[in-house]
Image (spheres, rainbow, N blue to C red):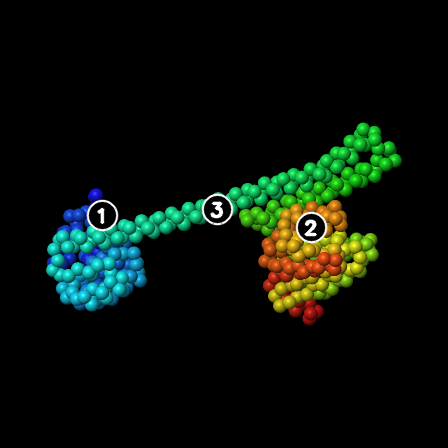
Amino acid sequence: MAVQPANILVVDDELGIREGVRRVLTREGHRVVGANSGEAGWELLQSDDFDLVLIDVMMSDISGMELLQRLVELNPDIICIMITGYATISMAVQAIKEGAYDFIAKPFDANTLLLAVNQGLDRRRLAMEACRLADVEKEKDALEQRKTELEQLDRVKSAFTVTVAHELRAPVAAIQSYLRLILDGYIPADRQREYLIRAETRARAQLDLIGDLLDLARLRNPDLCIDRECVDIAQELRDVCELMAGQIQEKSLQFSVSIPESSVHVLANTRHIRQLWSNLISNAIKYTKAGSVTVVMEVQDSKVVTCITDTGIGIAKEDLDRIFEDFYRTKAAKAYTQMGTGLGLSLVKRIVETYGGEIDIQSTVGEGSQFTVTLPLHALSASTRRQEETQ
């Protein structure tokens, strides 16, 4: 079998040794570089890539053992063979312990040199092949893991597509049914407005669903560049609470709101903040038949913490881990009202995470739920509050 050319360094302060080794190994097709001292050899080792190094134990500047220690730290994959005219068993053992592959004594002939070098290079080739195979195995495992993830993602996407198609189809089918009844003359003129209102309600629900889907898609896009500005999150919450006051009155619920009078700023998209509060508060109202809805916002150090609490139907423990999934609605929620896409809380969680916040939920079936949203304050918020306090 042809010998694979190797890059070999000989570190020895004897010119005769260096030249003799060079002649023997060059004839075998190897590239051989010589260094006349330990420090010279060390400089070459740092600037070139060698497969094998022959190091004299006794040199005038630094010892071969010291150079061996440096080399093992620099590149433990290089094969090191120690050469000396003062060979002892204890020195050979020490050299092997320090990381040398072999030890040959001066004077040595060409056959002894070639045997040690060829065995060392075979060892290196085996080690490099083992590393290559290990890398291939790692790459194979990574590809299999990626394949599994892609297959799982494909299943999720398929399930998502089916769900979206169903959710979009249902309102259209209902609207078509209402319109067909009117067009075919089954609905008397005095009741047509009633059916048109039903159709408009289903169309509005479908538009809400499409809007939520588009918002989720945008927020999940890693390349999305969101326009952010300094948003007064307290004022946005006050505005949403005012808009929800009519729904509170219709259901005769108590509505308690505690929001800081001063500005509380976060760096976000204003529309997302409005969606966040609207979804959480409208859910609290929707699923509360009697009792109260409470909204409390507090500034705590560098964060703003908002709790929205209701005395509604509550959420079972087994549903808490899935409550933020797309299209997920609990059996209790479906039984309470058919209206709802199951995307509101999914959108809420995505908004909170987009702006580096956290959302927590505590709930008891039949007693109510509390959603706690924590968002980082914008740096301007603290200075703005101090200015407002001095005015």
Instruction: Confirm whether residue 278 shows in the render.
Output: no
Q: In the image, 79: left or right of 239?
A: left
Whichever of labels 3 and 2 marks the residue nearer the N terminus, that label is 3
Q: In the image, 6: left or right of 129?
A: left
Q: Give the label, 3 or 2, closer to the camera.
A: 2
Dot 2: within a 10 Å radius of its alpha carbon, few (fewer than 14), some, or many (20 or more) residues? Answer: some
Q: Name the residue that disc number 2 marks.
A: 330
Residue type, label 2: Thr
Residue type, label 3: Arg
Q: Name the residue that disc number 3 marks.
A: 146
Rendered view: 225 above or below 357: above
Q: Residue furthest bottom?
A: 390
Q: Name the residue that disc number 1 marks.
A: 5
Dot 3: within a 10 Å radius of its alpha carbon, few (fewer than 14), some, or many (20 or more) residues? Answer: few
Give the image location of residue 305, x and y in percent: 66, 63
Give the image location of residue 340, x and y in percent: 72, 47
Whichever of labels 1 and 2 marks the residue nearer the N terminus, that label is 1
Dot 1: within a 10 Å radius of its alpha carbon, few (fewer than 14), some, or many (20 or more) residues? Answer: some
Describe the element under mark 3 as helix, strand or loop: helix
Q: Residue at x 15, y 57 (%)?
A: 18
Give the image location of residue 319, x and y in percent: 66, 53
